[in-house]
Amino acid sequence: MTPRVTTVDVTVDADLKEFCITPLSDLHIESRDFGNDEFQAFLRKRNTLPGHRAFIIGDAMDLVVPVDMKRWTASCQDQRISGRDDWLNEALDIATERLTESGTQIDLIGPGNHELEFRKRHGFDTTSVLAHSLGCARGGYSGYMQYRVKLPIGKKTATVGMFRIAYHHGAWGGRLVKGFGGARDWFRCFDSWNIAVYGHNHQSTVHRETKLRPAQNGSLCEYPVYYVCCGAWVESYTQDAARTHYSERAGHMPTSRQSPLIRVRVTNHGGGHTKTLRGQQLQYTVEM
């Protein structure tokens, strides 16, 4: 059974006290219109950040094949795949190569609508195969990615807290609001998350809100939450006008290829609930 909640232990550096996360969505990684050089340069730059790691919330693969007459064209696949009888084997090899090339730690990969459609039509789960190849957890279409943050104290480590990311591959469009309305409605029935991430519409945006919870002294504690649309890594508007990507045909606007950055820091606010942690708490921000 695939769990809805995946937990990963992260021990931060004793001096920097920070780690960084890149949520990835809509790579369509074996598509002809995937810019691998740009993607690898992006990940290598991210890997210079403290404790950098990533996870993927769907459509890692394109999987647009001839039975999908709505989206299929002969030019949509990578040239390494075209003309091969074992094209799926090669597509999975390409995906594995490109996801491991930069050396980025990937904690989870979940399916998107492209993977689910392929599994429905062909009875093959590419997400589980990729998860096995990458040595990471296999997630769901939605769920929780949570990081148990630990801090070195002397020769031991102590747990500071749990940093939770709720995710859904996405099901919401909106040319102006970029799916925020539907995403906000979906995530409001889930509790205890710091960041909510989604994708699917190939847009990128960060929206911050404030929530309140009771504090131990009878007052209210204010804390931030972020709704994050994760962007995409496929070029949906080709330079060659003779080729028409299905996104162009559907009237979707061209999108920049980028992914957000989540920074999580351990900070000392004094006091604290235990003598060992001395008020160490988690602070977090999202950059695009």
Image: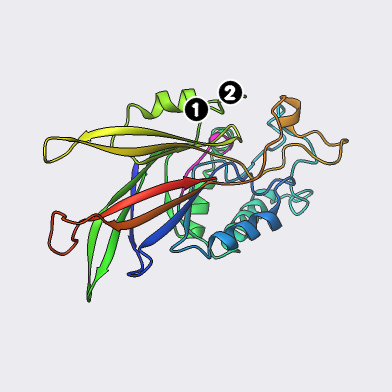
Q: Residue at x 35, y 70 (%)?
A: 15
The C terminus lies in which quarter of the figure? top right
Numbered label tally: 2
Q: Is residue 100 above or below residue 211?
A: below
The part of the image, by quadrant, that contains residue 148 is bottom left
Instruction: Give percent across and percent down for residue 66.
Output: 72, 35
Q: SS for tag 2?
A: loop
Q: Earlier in the sequence, mark 1 or mark 2?
A: 2
Picture disc at residue 174: 2
Q: CA distance from mark 1 to mark 2?
A: 8 Å
Q: Nearer the viewer, residue 61 or 223?
A: 223
Q: Residue at x 69, y 28 (%)?
A: 252
Residue stretch in magenta:
108-114
Picture disc at residue 285: none
Residue 80 appears left or right of 259:
right
Residue 176 appears left or right of 14:
right
Determine contact: label 1, label 2, CB under 8 Å. yes
Instruction: Give percent across and percent down for residue 172.
Output: 53, 26
Q: Residue at x 55, y 59 (%)?
A: 46
The part of the image, by quadrant, that contains residue 240 is top right
Instruction: Give percent across and percent down for residue 131.
Output: 48, 53
Q: Which residue is mark 1?
A: 180
Circle 2 crowding by C-alpha within 10 Å: few under 14, some 14–19, many from 20 = few
